[in-house]
Amino acid sequence: MAKLGKRLKSAYEGVDSNKFYTLEEAVKLIKSGAKSKFDETIEVAMNLGVDPRHADQMVRGVVELPNGTGKTVRVAVFAKADKAEEARKAGADIVGAEDLAEQIQGGMMDFDRCIATPDMMGVVGRLGKVLGPRNLMPNPKLGTVTPNVTEAIRAAKAGQVQFRVEKAGIIHAGVGKASFDEAKLVENIKAFIDAINKAKPAGAKGTYVKKVSLSSTMGVGVKLDIASVNA
């Protein structure tokens, strides 16, 4: 068995792999173990009792975290004329129409969120094979196909998190940075888990949330006591 490095060995110290911690205890442990030279992302992973291969068990949505994510989000907007100018004034990093589609088809992917006005979906639809696998395809259900580009850009920049369950029934997301104070991280995590609970699909049977764990980018996972999160 490979030996643990000093940093990872230190991270494991004080963490009981068999214990289910309250949210407050877990946040304190994860923050104390995040000792990298960069500001580590705090991540939540949830094991759900769903099979996303069935349409009535898909879990997908969006949540705006109360304290943001701590990440700088670059936003691309498909819009024309007045809406393009509105997008620029609202702080969009990239704005375009057919020209933007050509850039993306050529490999330009320098953005984290893609928004489109409804009239641009004929153009954007041709990019499904490029944007879809990266979870960047604008979608009206997620608020990224909208005539209100100002609000969509504001939400994306303010810490809106999109989520989508993976094949194994796992859903995960970054919910803040290790530099955040504990109370803000607790608020963000509760908001994220609450959004997942509210997104429970009609086809979900039995236990919906099976397991929740918390970790930092370079740290170990800590299991959460689900009851304490929902309290």
Image: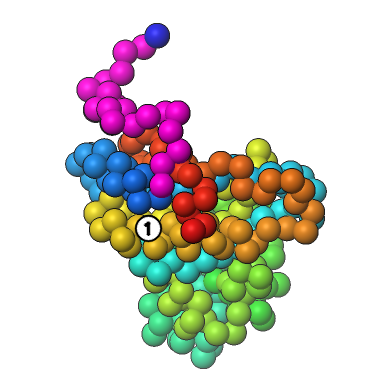
Give the residue at x 39% y 85%: 89
Q: Give coordinates of residue 46: x percent, y percent.
A: 55, 45
* Residue stretch in magenta: 2-22
* Colour scheme of the picture: rainbow
Q: Secondary structure at mark 1?
A: helix
Residue 6 magenta-drawn? Answer: yes
Q: Nearer the viewer, residue 105 or 209?
A: 209
Q: Residue at x 66, y 73 (%)?
A: 140
Query: Where is residue 141 shown, x and y percent of the image?
Result: 66, 70
In the image, farthest residue toward the top = 1
In the picture, the quarter occupied by the N terminus is: top left
In this orientation, does residue 126 appear?
A: yes
Q: Look at the picture and state if 13 lies above or below 151.
A: above
In the image, 27: left or right of 146?
left
**Residue 152 falls within the magenta-colored stretch:** no
Bin the neighbour count of mark 1 within 10 Å (Cα to Cα): few under 14, some 14-19, many 20 and up: many
Amino acid type of disc 1?
Answer: Val
Quadrant position of residue 219: top left
Residue ranking furthest to the bottom? 82
Q: Main secondary structure of the magenta part?
A: loop
Image coords of residue 149 (percent x, y) = 52, 81
| Residue 128 visible at all | no
Residue depicted at 41% across the width and 36% down the height: 221
Location of residue 35 with respect to 111 vertically, above or below: above
Does 136 sit left or right of 29 as displayed?
Answer: right
Q: Position of residue 9 (x, y in %)?
A: 27, 23
Along the line of sight, the residue nearer the viewer: 80 or 229: 229
Tag count in the figure?
A: 1
Horizontal side of 91 relative to 180 (left or right) equals right
Identify the residue at horizontal 73%, vertical 58% (top origin): 201
Q: Which residue is mark 1?
A: 186
